[in-house]
């Protein structure tokens, strides 16, 4: 039901068995900007789209812990280590809120995690690129969390209540993440020539993959039109990507760094930056699981899951014991 294989799209026609009056009432509520809640009636395709998007989002948070987790033991100071540790823990929390939101739609968490571990479920392409230097941790916070905020702020008004509410807290935390990344970039860009070079190199490698995070262009995005109609998405992929470029280019200029795009140009008439062509073949290859460190990421994720089995078992045994004790007392 949640599977995210490329060829399956949720916007296939609504099953004929769904009563028209229920569909009409649902559409009217969405059009009136009401939140849809777990026990409310909803079309099966709406439910499927939500499980797909929310579970992919949850997987991205959890896999996103890996490239940064690699640097906790190598952070250049105790302060940097503490901040990075807190950030990575936040990402774990985001994954949990999101899995919980997806569970309210009737899909078991184990099922979603199984789909991730067997390679059936997608997660953001961005986490299939390696983190080579400390400057990458700055670039991830600045660009990747920056792109995530751009995408997630509108999701606070997504039509499904539990997803929207999860986003409120996630966005507050992402905003701290973006600032910690930008602060690292500021230190490095104003540091030694070698540090500035590292910052520029990180920007060069993370810029284009960050633009890809917003998904394919609108005219090649099979899900956008229906998701906009259902108000699951509030902006299209291209709108959010443009907004990100408009906000981020002046930040790069402030750092004294160069965005690696010779076609980047501010258009006085539109008030927006024009930018070069994204390599969509690279994007689709990474989506298909051929990213530079995709196999390493999945190996590390499955290993973390297996090594954490005793914690899950202990927590479940403790909960069962407490439940038994409560029942005995009643
Ligand atoms: N990567 O029709 P489209 C974070 C897939 S966490 C991989 O436009 P949709 C962070 C897409 O799934 C950031 N796959 O789809 C965490 C679809 O395939 P299926 C994660 C992608 O859903 C830790 C197909 O391509 N944020 O930032 O309307 C540390 C066609 O696309 C990608 C979210 O998940 C991609 N980049 O729009 C630091 C936000 N893009 O499922 C940071 C919530 C597209 O049909 N999600 N695909 O087989 C969304 O807003 C939307 O799902 C997307 C895609 C904009 C991502």
Image (cartoon, rainbow, N blue to C red):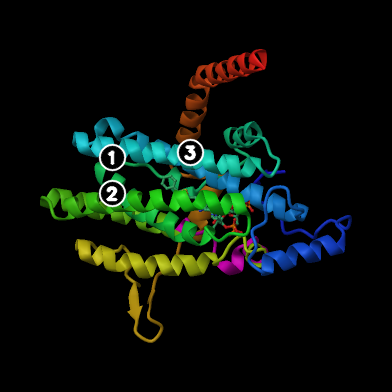
Of tags 3 and 1, which is closer to the observer?
1
Residue 273 in percent (x, y) is at 37, 75
Gap in angstroms between the C-alphas marked 3 and 1: 18 Å
First along the sequence among labels 3 and 1: 3
Q: Is residue 151 above or below residue 329?
A: below
Please identify the quadrant where the C terminus is shown: top right
Q: Can you tell which mark lies on residue 62?
A: 3
Give the structural element (helix, strand or loop) at label 2: helix
Question: Is the residue under label 1 in contact with that under label 2 (CB below 8 Å)?
Answer: yes
Q: Is residue 187 above or below residue 103?
A: below
Give neighbour class at mark 1: few <14, some 14-19, many 20+ (Cα, 10 Å).
some
The answer to whether any part of residue 293 appears in the image is: no
Residue 157 in percent (x, y) is at 55, 61
Q: Which residue is mark 1?
A: 83
Give neighbour class at mark 3: few <14, some 14-19, many 20+ (Cα, 10 Å).
many
Q: Which residue is mark 2?
A: 180
Q: Quadrant of residue 114?
A: top right
Give the structural element (helix, strand or loop) at label 1: helix
First along the sequence among labels 2 and 1: 1
Q: Can you tell which mark lies on residue 168?
A: none
Give neighbour class at mark 2: few <14, some 14-19, many 20+ (Cα, 10 Å).
many
Gap in angstroms between the C-alphas marked 2 and 3: 19 Å
As rendered, which of 10 and 22 lies closer to the eye? 22
Q: Which residues are magenta?
A: 212-226
Residue 187 in percent (x, y) is at 17, 51
């Amino acid at each position: 039901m949640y599977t995210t294989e490329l060829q399956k799209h949720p916007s296939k026609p609504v099953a004929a068995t769904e009563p028209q009056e229920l569909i009409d009432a649902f559409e009217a509520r969405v059009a009136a900007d009401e939140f849809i809640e777990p026990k409310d009636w909803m079309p099966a395709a709406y439910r499927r789209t939500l499980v797909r998007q929310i579970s992919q989002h949850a997987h991205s948070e959890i896999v996103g812990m890996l490239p940064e987790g690699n640097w906790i033991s190598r952070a250049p100071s105790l302060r940097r280590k503490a901040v990075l540790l807190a950030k990575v823990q936040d990402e774990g929390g985001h994954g949990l809120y999101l899995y919980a939101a997806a569970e309210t739609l009737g899909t078991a968490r184990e099922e979603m995690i199984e789909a991730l571990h067997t390679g059936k479920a997608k997660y953001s392409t961005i986490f299939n690129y390696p983190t080579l230097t400390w400057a990458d941790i700055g670039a991830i916070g600045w660009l990747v969390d920056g792109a995530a905020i751009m995408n997630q702020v509108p999701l606070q008004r997504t039509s499904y209540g539990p997803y929207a509410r999860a986003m409120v807290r996630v966005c507050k935390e992402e905003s701290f993440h973006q600032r910690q990344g930008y602060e690292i970039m500021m230190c490095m860009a104003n540091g030694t020539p070698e540090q500035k070079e590292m910052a520029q190199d990180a920007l060069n490698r993370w810029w284009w993959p960050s633009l890809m995070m917003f998904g394919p262009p609108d005219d090649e995005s099979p899900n956008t039109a229906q998701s906009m109609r259902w108000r699951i998405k509030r902006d299209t992929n291209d709108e959010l990507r443009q907004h990100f470029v408009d906000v981020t280019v002046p930040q790069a200029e402030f750092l004294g760094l160069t965005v690696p795009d010779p076609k980047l140009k501010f258009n006085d008439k539109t008030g927006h930056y024009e930018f070069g062509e994204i390599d969509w073949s690279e994007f689709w290859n990474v989506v298909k699981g051929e990213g530079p460190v995709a196999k390493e990421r999945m190996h590390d994720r499955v290993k973390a899951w297996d090594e954490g089995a005793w914690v899950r078992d202990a927590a479940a045994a403790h909960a069962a014991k407490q439940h038994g004790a409560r029942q005995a007392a009643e």
